[in-house]
Amino acid sequence: MKYIPPLTKTGDASYVPYHIPSGEEGSIPRARVFEHPQREILNVITENGYVPDSANLEQLYTAIQKMINDAVPTLTADALIIEGVTFASSVTTNGQVVYFDDGNSHYDLALGGTHIPSGIADVSNNRVYISGRLPDGFITDLSAGTYYLSTSTAGAITSVVPSGTAIEIGDALSDTVLNVDVGETFNRLATTSVAGLVKKSDLATKAGLDKNRYLTEAQFQKLMDDAIAAHILNLDVTNSHSEVIYDGP
């Protein structure tokens, strides 16, 4: 919508009233001045699913309130939920992990190492659980422990820490209840050569270790800096005598 100046005026010219002492004529509004605001208001009302009603003068307020409610996640006693979402056609089952696809303005299946997950899809009710406890039985056959976003099957979770990128999705409270808590992304430390991972031997070389029995302070700091930069999970270091000289998180 653009500003519509008075008849015979252009740009951002203001409307003025008739001025009796000076004889200055008042501004003459164009027809669009009356039409355009009505169409703008009606668009807000109808796009939110309401039928225009001349007897109801609160429809614009109601429509705006609906837009606000739809945009703000719902906080229940157990979970934080985004209501009224749109899913891609690939999202077909409750319990699948999804991410928000900005380009298509909908939620699609998330894949570890490729997407940043938003939460768990509730296809039946058009909503996404961002965090908190899922309803009992929403996902079944769980085992105690932490679940991660699968790097091989889009939308799936796994109790096995994936090789490479590992993103925590939540913890199983029972075999039928998952507490959603999307966590940080980590790179799992590898002991053998795996594409895309950091090997212990590679990390030791990168840190300038010479396989002595102990680490110098400078070597230890370099090792820690490299580990943090790589977001390494479960770092442990041994010397040439197979003695553990660092066993960290």
Image: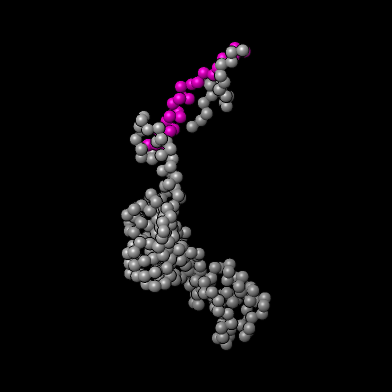
Name above or below for residue 98 compared with residue 211: above
Q: Is residue 111 visible?
A: no
Tell me if 46 is positioned left or right of 183 in this view. Answer: left
Q: Locate residue 39 relative to residue 223 in the image: left or right.
A: left
Task: Please report the residue visible at 46 percent of the width from the left and 29 percent of the height from the top.
Answer: 37
Image coords of residue 42 (percent x, y): 40, 33
Query: Compared with residue 205, is residue 107 higher up or lower down, i.e. above or below?
Result: above
- Seen from the viewer's position, the closer of residues 222 and 48 is 48
Query: Does any portion of residue 185 appear in the rendered image?
Result: yes
Q: Residue at x 38, y 49 (%)?
A: 84
Q: Is residue 197 above or below residue 246?
A: above
Counting from the top left corner in percent of width and height, residue 26 is at 55, 17
Task: Write the residue at 41% across / 56% down.
Answer: 76
- The quadrant in which residue 111 appears is bottom left
Query: What is the x, y in percent for residue 247?
Result: 55, 79
Q: Tell me what residue is drawn at x 48 percent, y 21 percent.
A: 30
Of residues 197 and 162, the one nearer the viewer is 162
Which residues make up the magenta segment?
22-46
Residue 249 or 63: which is nearer the viewer? Answer: 63
Q: Main secondary structure of the magenta part?
A: helix
Percent coordinates x, y for residue 90 in the rendering = 35, 55
Name the residue nearer the viewer: 90 or 56: 56
Q: Residue furthest bottom?
A: 241
Display coloring: one colour
Tag count in the figure? 0
**Quarter placement of the C terminus:** bottom right
* Residue 31 counted in the magenta span: yes
Q: Is residue 213 covered in magenta? A: no
